[in-house]
Image (tube, rainbow, N blue to C red):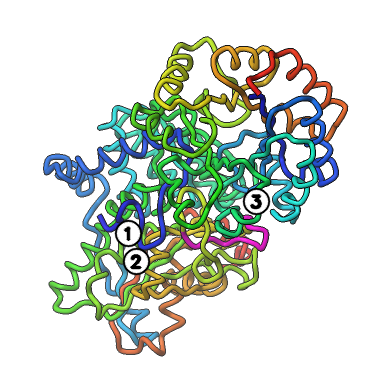
């Protein structure tokens, strides 16, 4: 499962749509579309800077969802990644209704697994993808298995997006093995994947990866984005999709 | 605990990245152990008494009372070591950090008072310390930046967003996610994910408890108790002493800034709506595209787009009345207290005093307690800039 994160509306709506198409054409299995929020505490300088700029430009959630719909025909699977306030304010049930058939799930950076019920109880009818981190304890991992999400989002480093994951660490490999054993879900490694080498190592260890910062960095320059995606996605073996 | 499953009514919760969940659980466990341990509580009481200077006096401000026609009492948190109520919480949380075996603490700061109080506790307990402060605040509260550095803290100046308290909190979270194994984040306001609002309120409730004892001994509780509200630590600490005393009117004073227009104030309850911001569900100042709105206050400590979840709940239940005082009225109160009583208040606390002075007519003949949460030495540059040095 090869996933690419693209920031909605960045650097403008036109180039956002073109970036999504480029990702779909390059052979990604899924796209995580970031809906910008101007307090992006889980993000490092590249995504945070772009998100704050876009969030403050006045773009609406509705506009980003419309742009995502224009990419539906490509057949690539779509997820939304954002912060709780965006969906809370849009209206949780209303968001769910609006995104039925469009999104396969949502990833909420500031929503830990134990708080998923807050959204489900208020009418969210889309799966929330659960997280497992290097800090997760046995019970946390087991609880992730109860999620309706189609995979586990594994945060392979302590830090924010744009930092570097350490694939040599036994801490990380052991934790991924535990997650696979206890959840029976596919494991996708996010945070810290920068290049083809990282992607290969992620696929050797887990079932998939997501690249964010390096893609967002190139959203303003489509030829550079295409070249990067080609190098990233075609040098790594096809996932199980 | 007043929180139930981490919520005050519908407000609160734990809206943080999954990585921090084990650390929050560990913190809650350590806090509950602390509450159960007589020895630990006595240790904190010892530091509060011999190091911080508790109990603080309740002072009858005779000259203001005479001029304005009501009896004004001031809870003198400004007399505490480091100059504000913030030390009540930082000593408590630094002890929890030590119990958890953490060798480093981090903090956010707006006015610099919480940063100084954290740096002080870190020096006392031999902890490494980094304080995050927005550039705007670091410039307008320079004396506190100097104090933190002298105390051995690293001051990390934040240059994103409006470069104020919100951005400092975000920067502190980013540090904590990466450093959580050996670092405790000492949040300074009654904000953030559970159990922080509860821990901060607990350590600050000494303010209300002492005040209540003072008035009980004197023979009657005050008619009104007033405190300023940004994130809401001094106010929740004061209010908790009187929540069950239905006859005591409780008033929280937010920063009215320049005007009620978006971007011009920091009155989260008055001008905000429900939202999820920096760890909890509460009232948040935000715009029509669900983004956090810019805020403004003359006082760096109140210049924040959110407020504590317990305040949001107390607003909804009606137990506390929340109102606001603008920059100009806070400045007037600052000068009145300085000239008439010889007490230079922090600009934050000046908002609470400002409300009392504005309401003099309706408060006539009543007994009013204002929490003087900090002293104003740090605000000299702002005062000079606002008055052209003519104050």
Q: Which residue is mark 2?
A: B371
Please determine whether, in this image, residue B189 is positioned above or below residue A177.
below
**How many marks do you count on the picture?**
3
Please determine whether, in this image, residue B74 is positioned above or below residue A70.
below
State yes or no: discs 2 and 1 in contact (Cβ < 8 Å): yes
The structure residue drawn at horizontal position 75% and vertical position 31%, both measured from the top left corner, is A217
Q: Secondary structure at mark 1?
A: helix
The structure residue drawn at horizontal position 62% and vertical position 24%, both measured from the top left corner, is A209
Chain label for disc 1: B
User: Which residues fall within the magenta stretch?
Assistant: B282-291
Q: Which residue is mark 1?
A: B77
Label 1 packing within 10 angstroms: few (<14), some (14-19), many (20+): many
Q: Nearer the viewer, mark 1 or mark 3?
A: 3
Instruction: Verify whether residue B285 appears in magenta.
Output: yes
Dot label at residue A99: 3
Looking at this view, is B200 or B358 the one in front? B200
Instruction: Verify whether residue B199 appears in magenta.
Output: no
Q: Secondary structure at mark 3?
A: loop
Image location (x, y in percent) of residue B6: 34, 51
Question: Which label's residue is closer to the chain start, 2 or 1?
Answer: 1
C-alpha distance separating marks 1 and 3: 52 Å
Looking at this view, is A25 or B41 the one in front? A25
Image quadrant where residue A88 sits: bottom right
């Amino acid at each position: 499962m090869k996933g690419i994160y693209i920031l909605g509306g960045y650097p403008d709506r036109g180039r956002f749509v073109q970036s999504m198409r480029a990702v779909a054409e390059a052979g990604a299995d899924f796209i995580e579309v970031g809906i910008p929020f101007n307090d992006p505490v889980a993000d490092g300088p590249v995504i945070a800077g772009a998100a704050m700029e876009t969030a403050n430009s006045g773009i609406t959630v509705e506009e980003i969802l419309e742009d995502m719909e224009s990419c539906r025909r490509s057949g690539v699977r779509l997820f939304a990644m954002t912060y709780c306030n965006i969906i809370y304010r849009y209206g949780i049930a209303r968001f769910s209704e609006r995104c039925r058939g469009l999104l396969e799930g949502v990833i909420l950076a500031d929503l830990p697994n134990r708080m998923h019920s807050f959204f489900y109880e208020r009418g969210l009818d889309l799966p929330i993808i659960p997280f497992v981190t290097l800090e997760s304890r046995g019970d946390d991992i087991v609880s992730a298995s109860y999620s309706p999400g189609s995979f586990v989002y594994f945060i392979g480093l302590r830090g924010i997006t744009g930092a570097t994951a350490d694939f040599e660490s036994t801490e990380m490999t052991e934790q991924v093995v535990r997650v696979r054993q206890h959840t029976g879900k596919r494991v996708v490694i996010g945070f810290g994947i920068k290049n083809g080498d990282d992607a290969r190592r992620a696929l050797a260890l887990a079932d998939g990866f997501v690249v964010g910062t390096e893609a967002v960095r190139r959203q303003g320059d489509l030829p550079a984005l295409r070249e990067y995606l080609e190098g990233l996605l075609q040098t790594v073996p096809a996932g199980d999709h | 605990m007043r929180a139930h499953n981490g919520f005050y009514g519908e407000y609160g919760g734990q809206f943080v990245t999954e990585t921090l969940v084990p650390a929050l659980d560990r913190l809650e466990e350590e806090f509950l152990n602390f509450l159960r341990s007589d020895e630990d509580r006595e240790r904190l009481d010892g530091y509060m008494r011999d190091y911080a200077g508790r109990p603080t006096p309740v002072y009858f401000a005779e000259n203001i009372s005479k001029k304005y026609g009501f009896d004004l009492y001031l809870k003198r948190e400004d007399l505490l070591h480091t100059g504000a109520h913030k030390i009540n919480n930082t000593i408590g949380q630094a002890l929890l950090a030590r119990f958890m075996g953490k060798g480093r603490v981090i903090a956010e700061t707006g006015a610099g008072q919480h940063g100084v109080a954290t740096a002080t506790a870190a020096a006392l307990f031999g902890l490494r310390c980094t304080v995050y402060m927005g550039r705007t605040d670091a410039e307008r509260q320079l004396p506190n930046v100097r104090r933190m550095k002298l105390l051995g803290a690293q001051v990390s100046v934040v240059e994103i967003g409006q470069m104020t308290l919100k951005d400092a909190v975000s920067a502190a979270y980013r540090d904590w996610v990466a450093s959580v194994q050996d670092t405790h984040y000492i949040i300074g306001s009654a904000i953030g994910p559970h159990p922080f609002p509860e821990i901060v309120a607990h350590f600050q409730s000494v303010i209300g408890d002492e005040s209540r004892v003072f008035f009980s001994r004197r023979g009657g509780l005050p008619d009104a108790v007033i405190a300023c509200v940004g994130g809401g630590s001094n106010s929740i600490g004061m209010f908790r002493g009187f929540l069950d005393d239905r006859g005591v009117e409780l008033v929280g004073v937010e920063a009215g800034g320049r005007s009620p227009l978006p971007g011009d104030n920091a009155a989260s309850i008055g001008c905000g709506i429900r939202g999820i911001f920096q760890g909890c569900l509460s009232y948040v100042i935000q715009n029509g595209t669900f983004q956090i709105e810019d805020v403004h206050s003359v006082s760096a400590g109140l210049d924040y787009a959110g407020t504590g979840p317990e305040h949001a709940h107390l607003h909804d239940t009606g137990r506390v009345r929340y109102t606001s005082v603008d920059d100009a009225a806070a400045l007037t109160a600052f000068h009145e207290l300085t000239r008439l009583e010889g007490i230079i208040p922090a600009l934050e606390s000046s908002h609470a005093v400002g409300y009392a002075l504005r309401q003099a007519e309706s408060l006539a003949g009543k007994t009013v307690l204002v929490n003087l949460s900090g002293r104003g030495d740090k605000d000299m540059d702002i005062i000079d800039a606002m008055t052209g040095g003519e104050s």
